[in-house]
Amino acid sequence: MAKSTAVKRARRTLVWLLVIFIALAGVNAAGAIWGGGSWLPKLGLDLEGGTEIILAPKLESGQTVSDDQVSQAVSIIRQRVDASGVSEAQISTQGGQNIVVSIPGTPDAATLARIEASAKLEFRPVLVTDTATVPTTTPTPGLDSTPTASPTNASDLSWVTPALEDQFLNIDCTSTAATDAGQAPANQPLVACGDDGAKYILGPVEVSGETVTNATSGVAQTSSGASTGQYVVNIFFNGDGTTEFANVTTRLSGLTGAQNQFAIVLDGKVISAPRTLAVITNGEPQISGNFTAETAKTLADQLKFGALPISFTVQSQNTISATLGSTQLISGLIAGLIGLILVVGYSILQYRVLGAVTIASLVVAGTLTFLVVDLLSWRAGFRLSLAGVAGLIVAIGITADSFIVYFERIRDELRDGRGLESAVQAGWKRAVRTIFASDFINLMAAVVLYILAVGSVKGFALTLGMTTIIDLVVVIMFTHPIMTLLAELPFFRDGHKASGLDPRQLGAVYRGRAQFKTPTPAVARGKQASSSREAARRQTIAERRAAGGSTLVIESPPEAPETDASVTESEIDRSPDVDATVTASEPVNDAATPLGPNDDANAPTDSTPPTPSTPKPPVRKPSPKRKKR
């Protein structure tokens, strides 16, 4: 029953593995046909080439940029690129001021817009708003730009001067000059256009984007935890930002009309201008509106990664060729092929036909890895670089190591006298703990490396961690079930010499069904004793009846020393001179029974063989040299 259950479980596991393969292949095929995916994984910058964008700082007259500002800008732009799903991008500095962004392949418009929108993020109160239209007149030069009265706060309409009003009326939101307004000083008002088709007159900056610690998007929930179905953006400020934003909302919540709004300005453009419905004192405001999942995520990314210390403009955008190209890729694939051939050769040499299980498992692991990498390329923007290829090559050794541990555990169980079916299950219980411990260490190393590394090293860490997880899936859902089914085949079960599981070649003593193999000097005496006890314990009732009795009688050689007739089984096992041949018990005369005072030692005595139902302790035939007294 136990064997039948194990076989059924193995078949069911293989069916589930087949379902996983079909699902992954179907999703990849659907993506390649209808979803803009591809049949092959996308390659990284070093293997395919891509697009190079050079960002130059926008500086006012006499302004300079420091190394710390450039370094901070590089870090924020890298976070923006990673947040857009682009993998294996390279971001560096040029000339101490410019920032060079190299992206694999041809980036989409959303990615380019996210990179180019690299100005400082600011929160300004709205003074005046109107629908943006194409102007019919030109701005009038020479108008007064000084407020008629000193403004009391950032929402005071005294900021609106004749020059500012004329600029607001005649601004063309479709021209590049509209974004130049982003260079207005933080303590001065400005005119800006929005993504929503409106134009604004904004007051001075009241909250800097650098105070934003995080921003997320999602579906709003009620106080009871129920979903409203409306997408929102959640902003989180640090201590300074919490205080500043509380002051702003306290004032804005008491105003009406356009002055009730505050604008989020990025690169001189208003990306959002929500109304103030309440005083926010905890530093965690929530923006709601006609968001979709995509627009909410875009706004959250802009808020989270928009606080640059300086503004940048796109100086140039060029197409670059692969830095390593197909030659290095081919070299890496050849190295992986050599490693695979060595693993296969060792498996066949060490495990003979059993090595075919290793080969099949590697094929399954390789196919599963390809499908997962292709899926990540389509859905997560992952690109396979030369470092990622190195991670896949390392995975060959990790995967083969799991199989070797399992096979050796099975062999150990065979040496201990188990049958193959039992050895497969017992060996799995011992091997799975070792496999889990080894793969857990590899996975931890990959996770730490992925968190701390940047650039192509992240690709290596990702492929290493991914293949470690796939190794566990393959050894659990393929290798072990296949071994369970192979244990039922006579070729493996009977220990064929070419199977790699021949107990005779492994040095096993106990052969099953109470049969012994003749001990050899290569087999330790302790192993012989263990196998003898195992044979006595496993002898079936049918074997005992077929032998004519219910006990095992082990003959000793003529030179054996004189011992008492009631020799225990353990003493027989430990005796080096005992012949390990199992014989059927025969009727034994009363010579082994003590004689009474009136009994003649030479007189024949009647002896009745014990009935089969009467247990008889192990006895030992007396040595021919023993004299009766």
Image (tube, rainbow, N blue to C red):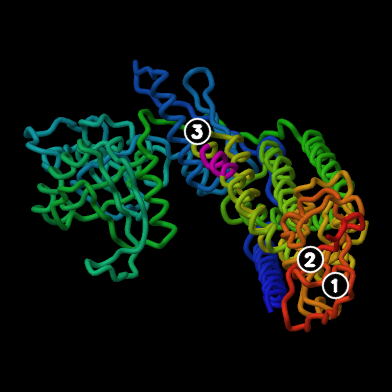
Q: Quadrant of the C terminus?
A: bottom right
Q: Quadrant of residue 628?
A: bottom right
- Kind of residue at badge 2: Val
Q: Amino acid at mark 1?
A: Val
> Residue 314 — which label?
3
Q: Is residue 88 left or right of residue 158?
A: right
- Mark carried by residue 600: none
Q: Marks 1 and 3: which is nearer the front?
A: 1
Instruction: Please indicate whether residue 78 sits to the left or right of residue 425 in the image.
Output: left
Which of pointers 2 and 3 lies earlier in the amino acid sequence? Answer: 3
Measure how far apart labels 1 and 3 are at the Cα level: 106 Å
Gap between marks 2 and 1 measured at Cα: 9 Å
Q: Which residue is mark 1?
A: 588
Distance from the alpha carbon under mark 2 to that under mark 3? 99 Å
Give the position of the N terminus as an image quadrant. Answer: bottom right
Q: Which mark is residue 619?
A: 2
Relative to residue 446, is residue 365 drawn left or right? right
Do the residues under discs 2 and 1 have CB atoms within 8 angstroms? yes
Q: Tell me the residue at 81%/37% (across/down).
A: 335
Q: Nearer the viewer, mark 2 or mark 3?
A: 2
Secondary structure character of the magenta stretch overall:
helix
Q: Position of residue 589 (x, y in %)?
A: 85, 73
Q: Is residue 410 visible?
A: no
Q: Residue at x 50, y 49 (%)?
A: 110
Q: Nearer the viewer, residue 206 or 479?
A: 479
Number of other residues with Cα within 10 Å of mark 2, as a class: few under 14, some 14 to 19, many 20 or more = many
Q: Which quarter of the picture shows residue 539?
A: bottom right
What residue lies at 36% left-to-right and 59% top-to-bottom?
Answer: 218
First along the sequence among labels 1 and 3: 3
Q: Which residues are the magenta region?
A: 441-448
The spot of residue 594 in percent (x, y) is: 76, 67
